[in-house]
């Protein structure tokens, strides 16, 4: 079956008992045992739940992994990912990451003594040098949040494995509709399902997808031990979102392309970041490892913070809010919102300036989004 069909049918056959085409929401925290330690596959709701099990099977399937695990948030998934690493572990992470992921990795470094380095792994020479020494985990986003830098995942997987490390990829921005890191050699895929997989800005969730069963068993153990699990209803909402991922990503991408083209070359714009533009420094890599370019566009407007504020005041369709990936268009000011936890010098050193705005293009009519951006630029 092809990807769009699998989004709807993978691991989701009608309920054998009633024929219900949607998986039932099993609101039960515990399950009867016929004798001590003898149960029908489910024991206690933290350890497993039938609605969650459907979501987890779907997640594994659409990311081409052998095991999927659902969490109460993207950062709950990252916390659990990091639980497998101890005080002497060496972690090599991308320098441009979601602010909360950076904060959690930095917290683990200071609190538990993990040896974590933040580097521009998009540069082949930087990755080669960093992974000439043994490492335990390589952690990247591609495209990154908010600068939409790319990492050559196939090449990085090889370097990580040579160094003895696992490669984990946060695939929140691209989604499996546009990029499947495990097929490129990654060992672990992380998602904030809050974003495109949920797709409607109504549920917080996270996921890990593991390449093989051994990693699946290790992380299922940690998922139960840590306990950052989603409710059955949240699993249902996420499943409902995933079924329309294919059509939504096509619409998000069409809108993002139109908005990026409008921004590019405008006299109030200093820089546009979108992997789908031929001006993106890694456009060739994007074409090679992605089947679409996603729905996020970042733009640096003239006039720094003042320019950014005037632009924001001029928008009518885009809503100023954190988060991304929902059907409605959102705009974020990373320096003061999503990435405020990253120290200013560090932020600015890699391009998250006060004039930078991150646009999550929704699935409204692209012409309305283009008009909105055009009239807001006129306010600067
Ligand atoms: C939002 C986000 C996260 C964190 O996920 P939550 O669901 O908010 O905990 C991690 N990575 C990326 C790329 C994100 O955009």
Image (cartoon, rainbow, N blue to C red):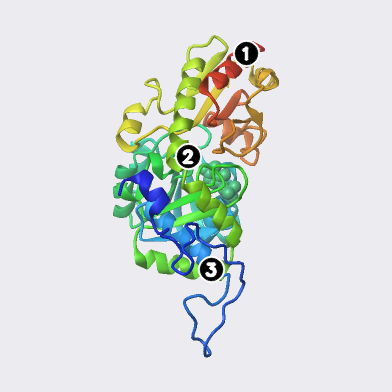
Whole-percent x, y for residue 167 in the image = 38, 52
Q: What's the mark number on residue 49?
A: 3
Seen in the picture, residue 22 relative to 252 is either above or below; the reply is: below
Q: Which of marks 3 and 2 precedes in the sequence?
A: 3
Q: Is residue 16 left or right of residue 155?
A: right
Seen in the picture, residue 237 relative to 145 is either above or below; the reply is: below
At label 3, counting other C-alpha atoms closer than 10 Å, the crowd grade (few under 14, some 14-19, many 20 or more) is: many
Q: Is residue 46 left or right of residue 59?
A: right
Ligand 1 within 8 Å of disc 2? The answer is yes
Q: What's the mark number on residue 173?
A: 2
Q: Is residue 118 left or right of residue 163?
A: right
Determine the CA span between mark 1 and mark 2.
27 Å
At label 2, counting other C-alpha atoms closer than 10 Å, the crowd grade (few under 14, some 14-19, many 20 or more) is: many
Q: Which of marks 2 and 1 precedes in the sequence?
A: 2
Q: Residue at position x 30%, y 43% from top?
A: 155
Whole-percent x, y for residue 365 in the image = 53, 24
Q: Residue at position x 49%, y 86% from top?
A: 38
Q: What's the mark number on residue 375?
A: 1
Determine the CA span between mark 3 and mark 1.
49 Å
Mark in front: 2 vs 3: 3
């Amino acid at each position: 079956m092809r990807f769009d069909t699998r989004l709807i049918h993978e691991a989701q056959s009608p309920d054998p008992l009633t024929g219900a085409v949607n998986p039932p929401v099993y609101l039960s925290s515990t399950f009867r045992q016929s004798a001590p330690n003898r149960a029908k596959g489910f024991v206690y709701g933290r350890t497993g739940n039938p609605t969650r099990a459907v979501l987890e099977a779907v997640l594994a399937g659409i990311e081409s992994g052998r095991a999927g695990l659902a969490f109460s948030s993207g950062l709950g998934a990252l916390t659990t990912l990091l639980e497998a690493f101890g005080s002497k572990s060496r972690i090599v992470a991308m320098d441009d990451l979601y602010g909360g992921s950076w904060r959690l990795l930095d917290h683990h470094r200071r609190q538990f003594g993990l040896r974590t380095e933040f580097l521009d792994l998009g540069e082949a020479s930087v990755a080669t040098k960093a992974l000439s020494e043994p490492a335990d985990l390589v952690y990247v986003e591609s495209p990154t949040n908010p600068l939409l830098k790319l990492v050559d995942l196939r090449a990085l997987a090889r370097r990580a494995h040579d160094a003895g490390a696992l490669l984990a990829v946060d695939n929140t921005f691209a989604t499996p509709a546009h990029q499947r890191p495990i097929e490129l050699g990654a060992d672990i895929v992380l998602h904030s399902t809050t974003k495109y997989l949920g797709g409607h800005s109504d549920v917080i969730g996270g996921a890990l997808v593991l390449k093989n069963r051994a990693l699946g068993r290790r992380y299922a153990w940690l998922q139960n031990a840590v306990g950052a699990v989603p409710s059955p209803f949240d699993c249902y909402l996420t499943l409902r979102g995933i079924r329309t991922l294919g059509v939504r990503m096509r619409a998000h991408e069409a809108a993002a392309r139109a908005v990026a083209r409008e921004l590019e070359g405008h006299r109030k714009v200093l820089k546009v970041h979108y992997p789908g533009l031929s001006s993106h420094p890694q456009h060739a890599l994007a074409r090679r490892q992605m089947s679409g370019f996603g729905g996020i566009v970042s733009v640096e407007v003239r006039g720094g913070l003042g320019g950014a504020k005037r632009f924001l005041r001029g928008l009518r369709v885009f809503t100023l809010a954190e988060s991304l990936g929902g059907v409605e268009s959102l705009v974020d000011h990373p320096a003061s919102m999503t990435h405020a936890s990253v120290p200013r010098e560090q932020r600015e050193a890699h391009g998250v300036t006060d004039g930078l705005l991150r646009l999550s293009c929704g699935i409204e009519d692209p012409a309305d989004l283009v008009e909105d951006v055009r009239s807001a630029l006129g306010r600067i």
